[in-house]
Image (cartoon, coloured by chain):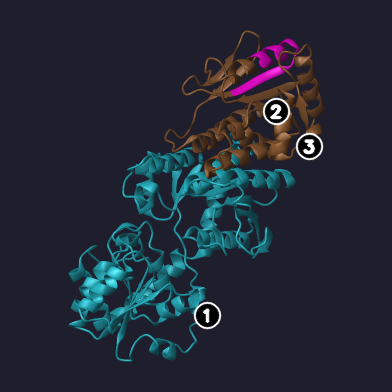
Amino acid sequence: MHVIIFSWEYPPRVVGQLANYVREVAVQLAKNNVKTTVVTYHDFLTGQHEEQEGIIIYRVTNPVRTHIGVLTWVLTLNQEVERAAANIYYNAHKQVDLIDVHDWHFTPAAVTLKKALNLPFVFSVESLEEHRSHGANSPFNMAIKSLEWLGMYEAEKLVVKSEWMRDEIYRLYKVPLEKIKVIQPKSVNWIKNILETYKSVAGGTASK
Amino acid sequence: MTKELTVMMLTWEFPPRIIGGISPHVYYLSRNLAKNGVKVYVVTCDFPEAPQHEVVDGVEVFRIDSYKNPSPDFATWVYLMNVNMQKEAAALVNSISGNVDIFHAHDWLVANAGIGLKHVFRKPLLTTIHSTEIGRRNGIHFDYERMIHETEAWLTYEAWKVICCSDYMVSHVKWAFGLPTDKLVMIPNGVDAEAYTRMEQDDLSSFRGKFALPEEKIVLFVGRLVYEKGVHVLVNAVPKVLEKVNAKFIIVGNGYMKEQLSNIVKNMGLAHKVQFTGFVDDETLRKLQKCADVSVVPSLFEPFGIVALEAMAAKSPVVVSDTGGLSEIVEHDVTGVKVYANNPESLAWGITKVLLDENFANLIKANAYKKVQEKYNWNKIAQQTKANYETVLSEYSKSFWA
C-alpha cells in the first residue's frame, strides 16, 4: 500500500500538536510496510528528503510570497502540494492508493486529485474552525468552514481522535456518523485501526 | 495529441457574464477555433439564468458555481472560485478520459486552476495576459497588489507560452515579470467586422437625428470616464475644434469623472454641443460608431485599444493618442491620425484635420477597414492561435511528460 499524507506542519516545522502526531503516524505506517510519502510545507527546506525509517518527505514552499491573510496563503500553497502529489503519483507509475489529509489546509488539493486521478482520500480532523475561532462567523471564518465542509463531503472516510469530535462534526456539518471513524491515538489498536480505514478506502473512490 | 486538437479555456467571464474585455475575447476566439477544427471546452463562472452546460457555435461551455464559498474580499474570492473551477474542470477532463491537449488560462483570475490542471494531467498550459496589476495601478503600492502581481508572475512562469495582444504588451509583460523573449507570443485582439457590415444597408439618418443636427459633424468618444482614458483632454479640445468646424461631441460610457466633466462643459457654455449618454446597448453603440464622422481615442494609458479597432471596422475615421497599443493599431496618415497624448491642441488639430478634409477621411477609413480585415480578423487570429498550440504540442511531444 502507498499513502500520501498531507499536513501543513511536520518536524522540524512544529506549529502545534499535529506535526509530531503526523510523524508518529508515518513512522508506524512505515513499520507496517506501508509506503509513506508526506507532503508538507517549509519556507526554505524544500525538495525531497528520506528519513531513516524510510519515509519520504516532500517539502514545498509558497509560489506567491506576499499575502493578505491565511486563506490566500493556503490557497496558493495548495497548488504546490497538488503539484508535488501529482509528481509522486506519476513517478510511482500511478501506484498510489490513497491520500490522508490532516486538517483543512490542503483539502482543495486532495479534492482536485480525487476528481482528476480517482485518488480517494481520508480526512483526518485534528480541530475545527468553529472551536478555533469560538463560533466566529465572519466571511473569513465561513470560508474556512466551507473548505472543511468540502473536505468532509468529498472524503471517503473521516478519522477523528475522540467521540466528542465525531459528535461535533455530526452537529456542525451533518456528516453521517458511519463515515466517521474514532481512532484514539493512545489506544492499543491505534495503527491497526488506521490501516483498516486505509484499506477500506484504497482502490478507488466510491463514485467509481 | 488526441484525435482532434482539444483545448480547455479557463476564463472568469464568458457571455452573458461580461465584466471586461476577456469575455468577448474568449467568445470570439473560441468560436473561431471551433470553425478551424479545434475542439474547445470553456470552463467559466456561472451567471443568473445561464445554463450550467451548453454548446454555443460548436464550443462546449461549462459554468461552475463561483459563489459557493463566502469570501472576505475580491482576491480571496478569486482563489476560492479557483478551488471550485479546478474541481469541476478536473472532473470534466476525467469524464472525457483525459482527452485535453492544452489548458489555456486567461489572466491571473484563473491562475490556480490552470496551474493545478497542468500538473495533475501533465498537459501544457498557455496563458493570455490581457492586463497586469502593475499596469492597472501604475506601480505596486500595497501587499494586496503585490500578491496579485506575484500570482501573475507565477502564472507566466508555469505557462509554456505567454500570449499578449500587442507588441506594447509583450514588452510590458517581459519587463514586469522578467520573462525570456522566446516565451512571449504576440497575437492581436480582433474585432467582429461583420457586426458592422450587417448594418451597411440600414438607413441611420433618423437615428443620427436623435444625437445631432444634419449640419453638425459627430465626434464620438467611447470608454470609461476615467483619467487614463483621457476624456478630459477631449473636453478641453472641444472649443478649439468648434472654432473651425460645427460639430457635436457624443461621449459614451460612465465613470467617476462624469460629473466633473459635465460641469466643465456647462461652465464653458457648450452643454448643447456635448452629450453624455452613459452606458448604451451594443446595437446603439454600433449605430453611433457607424454615424460618427470621427472616432476619438485620447487615452493616456492603453494596453490594446479595442475601441479604435471597432471604429475602424465601422468605417469611422479614427484619431488616437500615440501611446501603448494604439500606436501599433494606427499608422499615421494611412489608417488614422495619431496625436500627442494628453495634449488638447494636438487632439483638436487631429479632429479638425479629419473633419475638414473629406478625401483624407475617406482614404484613412478605407485603409483602416482593409487593415481590420487583414490583421484583426478573428478567423486569422484563431488560425495563429491554433498554429501556436501546434508548436507547443510538438515541443511537448519531446518532453518526458508526453
Name the colour assigned to chain B in the rendering: cyan
**Residue B239 percent location from the top left of the image:** 20, 78
**Residue B270 percent location from the top left of the image:** 24, 81
Magenta span contains residue A32: yes
Quadrant occupied by the N terminus of chain B: top right
Magenta span contains residue B86: no
Q: What residue sits right under mark 2 in the picture?
A: A165
Q: Is residue B379 left or right of residue B302?
A: right
Q: Are marks 3 and 2 on the same chain?
A: yes
Q: What residue sits right under mark 1 in the picture?
A: B198
Chain of the residue that carries numbered disc 2 in the rendered image:
A
Quadrant occupied by the C terminus of chain B: top right
Chain of the residue that carries numbered disc 1 in the rendered image:
B
Residue at (62% x, 60% y) in the render: B34
CA separation, marks 2 and 1? 66 Å
Magenta region, residue range: A24-39
Res A176 label: 3
